[in-house]
Every structure is written in C-alpha cells, then in structure tokens.
Amino acid sequence: MPDITWEAPYCAEGNSCFRVGTDADGNAYIAVKGQEEHYLADSIEALRALIRDVKAGKADHLL
C-alpha cells in the first residue's frame, strides 16, 4: 500500500463519509471512511476534475 496522507473525512447526511488523500508521487486517492485499504487512485488533476464536475451537477442523474 502506498504511503497515503489522508485528509479528515467528509461526511454528508447519514453515514456517507469519504476521505481524500495524496502520496509523495502526486497521486490522489478517495475511499470510504474506515475502508481506506479499498481506494480509487488517479492523478491529482483527475480528482480535481471529478470534484469540479460533481459540484457542477454533472453527476446529479446518479442520485
């Protein structure tokens, strides 16, 4: 497992808590709080784009 520095969890309503982290190589990670060993990894720019798109409503159809 890479050496990931995790941010504090972001929790919306209920038990939907996620954590975002980075490593020294410039990779970004996102995981469900408490299940950090099962993460999704990509570049930091890809994670930024994902967050921007979610904030812009581009994933609202999934709700």
Image: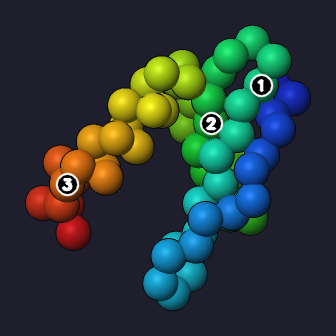
Counting residues from the start of the chain, the first of labels 2 and 3 encountered is: 2
Residue flagged by tag 1: what amino acid is it? Answer: Asp
SS at mark 1 in the image: loop
Does residue 21 appear left or right of residue 24 in this picture?
left
Does residue 26 appear left or right of residue 57 in this picture?
right
Alpha carbons under labels 2 and 3: distance apart: 21 Å
Residue flagged by tag 3: what amino acid is it? Answer: Gly
Residue flagged by tag 2: what amino acid is it? Answer: Tyr
Query: Which quadrant of the figure contains the N terminus?
Result: top right
Report the residue at 75% width, 12% height from top: 25
Tag shown at residue 29: 2
Does residue 28 appear left or right of residue 35 in this picture?
left
Residue behind mark 3: 57
Residue behind mark 1: 23
- Crowding around mark 3 (Cα neighbors within 10 Å: few <14, some 14 to 19, many 20+) is few
SS at mark 3 in the image: loop
Report the residue at 18% width, 48% height from top: 58
Counting residues from the start of the chain, the first of labels 3 and 1 encountered is: 1
Tag shown at residue 34: none
Report the residue at 72% width, 31% height from top: 22
Of the two numbered discs 3 and 1 in the rendering, the one whose residue sits closer to the viewer: 3
- Crowding around mark 2 (Cα neighbors within 10 Å: few <14, some 14 to 19, many 20+) is many
Alpha carbons under labels 3 and 1: distance apart: 28 Å
Query: Mark 2 and 1 residues: CB-CB less than 8 Å, in contact?
Result: yes
